[in-house]
Image (cartoon, rainbow, N blue to C red):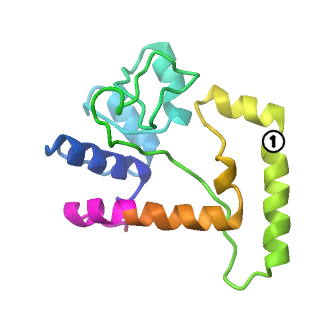
């Protein structure tokens, strides 16, 4: 409950205006095993865990949840491209610090992270799994805070309508 996979399913049902049986698992791994075993029909998951299975043909992708196709899986349309124009979900990660951390320390951490994130080897490895680096406007503390606020506003009505909550 409350994971990106769960939210993806809620958004999918919301946009299709349909209900599906939601089965909670203790993580992506157990859910993926059930999908591979044919015991569940659909799973929303990240490219980091599914790309190998997609390329190997053991699972069939219907679409990616970002607005455009991803370069490492170019034959898979986006759900928006397939007719769900307002469907977008991208899993993201961020660094957070305790409230009250001095701004100089926050800026130093952000600068170090930006420098590390521009490493060609790192970017190549991300791309192999269909992961896209964060856009520059979100890479700093202020842009990231604005993004978090926008994500909370986006997901609140979907979660409320589903009566779902994170444990």
Q: Quadrant of residue 3?
A: bottom left
Image position of 66 (left or right of 12): right
Left or right: residue 133 versus residue 156 is: right
Give how far across and how far down residue 98 sits, in percent.
68, 79
Residue at image location 66% in from the left, 82% down from the top: 99
Prevailing secondary structure of the magenta residues: helix
User: In which image quadrant can residue 71 be found?
Assistant: top right
Query: Left of 90 or right of it: where is 106?
Result: right
Residue 128 placement (x, y as % from top left): 65, 26
Q: Residue at x 84, y 74 (%)?
A: 105
SS of the residue at dot 1? loop
Q: Residue at x 49, y 14 (%)?
A: 56
In percent of the image, x 58 and y 30: which residue is there? 130
Q: Could you tell me which quadrant the C terminus lies in?
A: bottom left
Tell me: residue 49, above or below residue 90.
above
Which image quarter: residue 18?
A: top left
Identify residue for label 1: 118
User: Image height check: is 121 above or below 134?
Assistant: above
Image coordinates of residue 144 in percent, x first then y, are: 62, 62
Q: Are there few (<14), some (14-19), or many (20+) residues within 10 Å of tag 1? A: few
Stretch in magenta:
154-166
Q: Answer whether residue 128 is magenta in the image.
A: no
Location of residue 1 in the rendering, given as x and y in whole percent from the top left corner: 34, 59
């Amino acid at each position: 409950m409350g994971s990106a996979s769960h939210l993806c399913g809620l958004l999918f049902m919301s946009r299709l205006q349909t209900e599906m049986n939601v089965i909670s698992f203790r993580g992506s791994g157990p859910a993926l095993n059930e999908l591979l075993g044919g015991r569940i029909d659909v799973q929303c998951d990240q490219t980091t865990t599914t790309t190998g299975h997609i390329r190997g043909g053991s699972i069939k992708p219907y679409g990616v949840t970002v607005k455009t196709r991803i370069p490492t899986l170019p034959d898979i349309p986006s759900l928006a491209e397939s007719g769900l124009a307002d469907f977008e979900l991208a899993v993201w990660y961020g660094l957070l610090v305790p409230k009250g951390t001095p701004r100089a320390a926050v800026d130093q951490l952000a600068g170090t992270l930006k420098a590390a994130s521009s490493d060609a080897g790192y970017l190549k490895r991300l791309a192999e799994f269909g992961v896209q680096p964060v856009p520059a406007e979100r890479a700093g503390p202020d842009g990231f805070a604005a993004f978090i606020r926008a994500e909370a506003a986006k997901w609140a009505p979907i979660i409320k309508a589903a009566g779902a909550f994170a444990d």
